[in-house]
Image (spheres, coloured by chain):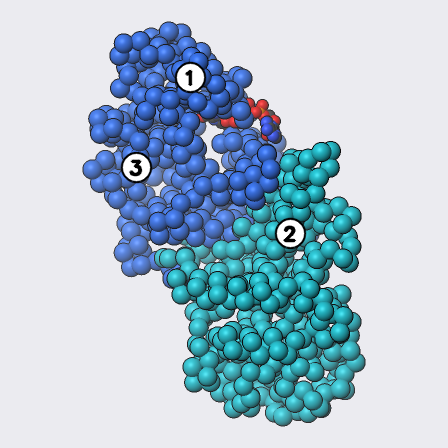
Chain colours: A cyan, B blue
Amino acid sequence: MNFTFSEDQEIFRDAFKKYLEANVTPEKIRSGWEDNKPFNQARWQELEELGILQSNLDGKYGGLGLDLVTSCLLVEEMGYYALPEPAAEQIFLSNLLINKSTDIAELIKEKNQFIGVTHSLSPNILFLDNSSKLINLGKDSISIAHSKDINGKKLKSSDPSRDLTNFTSENSDSGLLQTLNDQKSLINNVVTSGMVMSAAILVGLSRKILDLATAYTLDRKQFGKPIGSFQAVKHMLAQAAIEIEFSKATLYRAAYSLDNENPLQKLHAAQAKLQSIDACEMASKNSMQAHGAMGYTWEMDLHIFIRRGWSYKQVWGNKSLLENYIMNQLEKDLPKLGSTYTFI
Amino acid sequence: MKIGFSDSQKKFREEIREWLEKNVPKIPLNSFDTKEGFEEHREWEKKLNSGNWSMVTWPEQYGGRGLNLIEWLIFEEEYYRAKAPARVNQNGVFLLGPTLMEYGSDKQKEKFLSAMATGEHIWSQGWSEPGAGSDMAAIRTTAFKKGDKYIINGQKTWSSRAAFADWTFGLFRSDPESERHKGLSFILVPLDAEGVTVRPIPQLDGEPGFAEIYFDDVEVDVSNLLGGEGEGWSIAMATAGFERGLMLRSPARFQETASKLLSLYFKNKDNLSGSIESKVLQSWLKAEAYALNIYQTASKLMAGKKIGPESSLGKVFWSELDHQMHQTALDILGVSSELEEVVADDVASWIKGYMFSYSGPIYAGTNEIQKNIIAERLLGMPR
Ligand SMILES: Cc1cc2nc3c(=O)[nH]c(=O)nc-3n(C[C@H](O)[C@H](O)[C@H](O)COP(=O)(O)OP(=O)(O)OC[C@H]3O[C@@H](n4cnc5c(N)ncnc54)[C@H](O)[C@@H]3O)c2cc1C
């Protein structure tokens, strides 16, 4: 048992963090919003050059073949900096599909281009115009289509960093390249991966949201002192710190289980996602409160991060779905609950 | 990262499981907050020690097994699974023991550690005073040096298990000129010394779970000073760190409660509302999250990292969780939950646990104090 990260994992994460710190600033995110082009093609290129996009892709497809715990750490930082480009989706959804299915790998030969993935848990097409192909996960079939042939109505997300297109029965057949049948277990695997991905983003976002609030409370003075010296404010943020702390290990275990195909990987992923949903809500609400009216403005950067949480809480497994899943699982496994079964 | 147990750890689990199955009393012992139960629990400590199970992380020379923290967590999991008796000497083996190993002289280790392991010395802790609760630096009980003795005067209170314990360890003001955190010393005091009066205090369940301790010119030998004179505060902080964190609040306790709650829920499911279901689910999720966090913390410690104010995060988390779980259980039990004698559905133990869960957010530093620590020391907010 060693629940710590390796030196390599931390070095890679820290290097990526440095890149994000310099290149994914609120100003840059806002300028993408203003131009209605949240997806920055040049930055996508850089993510490729850094090895991020293909970090977990198998060596035989030109990737680095890194494990999903490393991916999880990278995606957590993407959350922290609210990276608009769908690198998290590329890693946890399309790369996973390519790694696990030679049929899909055969169909997706282009390197470094965004491959969209849709499923009933995340039905709207993300960044259609910036993707080369779209993989749709059905109940038990997977279909792959050319993105350029898909015409759908644009949808407006509450997060301007998310460019969405409606996926309907009319456009679902256009540009179709191939449909693969009997893919249930692979689909299940990708859904699990989506849960871990969205949980990692939420944990990163929560950390950032809390950091913004603590910094603000040092700065802002009322009654002649920094508002951070008031205990009511301290306790609000401390509570958020507690929720965040207790979502982390659950997340890393879920990533590890996914990577190692643990039979309970979906349960672990659902746990991680639920914890991260609660952490993000607590961090968002309390950090907003600590900002006062300033937090409730478009001008303050806080909402860039809070909004992203609104979306990621709902896609790839939302509270209701996850709770039902876990409860059913627990009822089935009742005899196997308790502390001696934490790691099986 | 490698999550899972090694073969030797699995073997260790089997070994302790087997031993506990053979040795855990079939009929639960009386509560250790009664005289009779206290002695039964002392016997149990002795029995544990006879199998070298008293404290598996202690070095072998003191009766331990020299095992690591992961193995300690395994031990705890099996211990709670077996419903083995509560540890009457927890303040000794989990708190003072590690503190002695870090700060004690060889002589002190020799004198106290094995007597602690066998249950010959049962320990209570004496931090709190009537005027020094959350504000522990307001301690006024004095221990002034005279020749080779400390003369102790004053009063400690809320000392768990002191009603029947043999020794207490605590902080005393040894420098008459000192204020606040300075001039405090960590001293070990036998409760049968002349001038000590112990007055038991009944707790919410009516049993004398803690006590006041009065000191009236009590003489203790200077060899009972732990660490240097005046260094008590920093030593006490180390001890309190063990308490809040990993040693005393092993996740197994909360996970076992959570699974008991799940069983209770599924048995009565058809009559229960959605809000109960959601609290049951939350309980299980949080107990698991706590366990995973502690395993990660144990791994970090084993890799040579230190934990400081982070332990405050866990203190708030487990104590709130414990209350939520017990409250939910009582909500499921409904009208029978007030009947302390009911054996079915374990009503009696749910009520007792429920009462006790009210104290979790208070003892070991209240949750408000923990949140101050989190805000000031982890988040860097101004005092
Ligand atoms: C079951 C149990 C067992 C115990 N066992 C022991 C033991 O073995 N040995 C021992 O020495 N002590 C023991 N204690 C005592 C425990 O350590 C104290 O109760 C605790 O430190 C709080 O002190 P207090 O009770 O005086 O409460 P107070 O300090 O009077 O606090 C009362 C309330 O005020 C709040 N408060 C106080 N100061 C602040 C502040 N600065 N900011 C915000 N809120 C504040 C507290 O959070 C609390 O809600 C035990 C207590 C319990 C309940």
Q: Where residue A23 sits: x, y (%)? A: 60, 67
Callout 3, which amino acid?
Answer: Ser
Q: According to the image, label 2 marks what residue?
A: A212
Q: Residue at x 43, y 49 (%)?
A: B297
Callout 1, which amino acid?
Answer: Arg
**Same-subunit check for callouts 1 and 2:** no
Which image quadrant shows ligand 1? top right
Instruction: In the rendered view, tell whether residue B364 sits above or below residue B146.
Output: below
Q: Residue at x 67, y 38 (%)?
A: A226
Q: Chain of mark 1?
A: B
Instruction: In the rendered view, tell whether residue B250 sits above or below residue B14.
Output: above
* Dot 3 alpha-carbon crowd within 10 angstroms: few under 14, some 14 to 19, many 20 or more: many
- The CA span between labels 1 and 2 is 43 Å
Label disc, if present, on residue B54 of the rendered structure? 3
Quadrant assignment, res A199: bottom right
- The CA span between labels 1 and 3 is 33 Å
Instruction: In the rendered view, tell whether residue A221 sits above or below residue A338.
Output: above
Q: Residue at x 76, y 57 (%)?
A: A299
- Whether tag 1 and tag 3 are in contact, CB under 8 A, the answer is no
Label disc, if present, on residue B173 of the rendered structure? 1
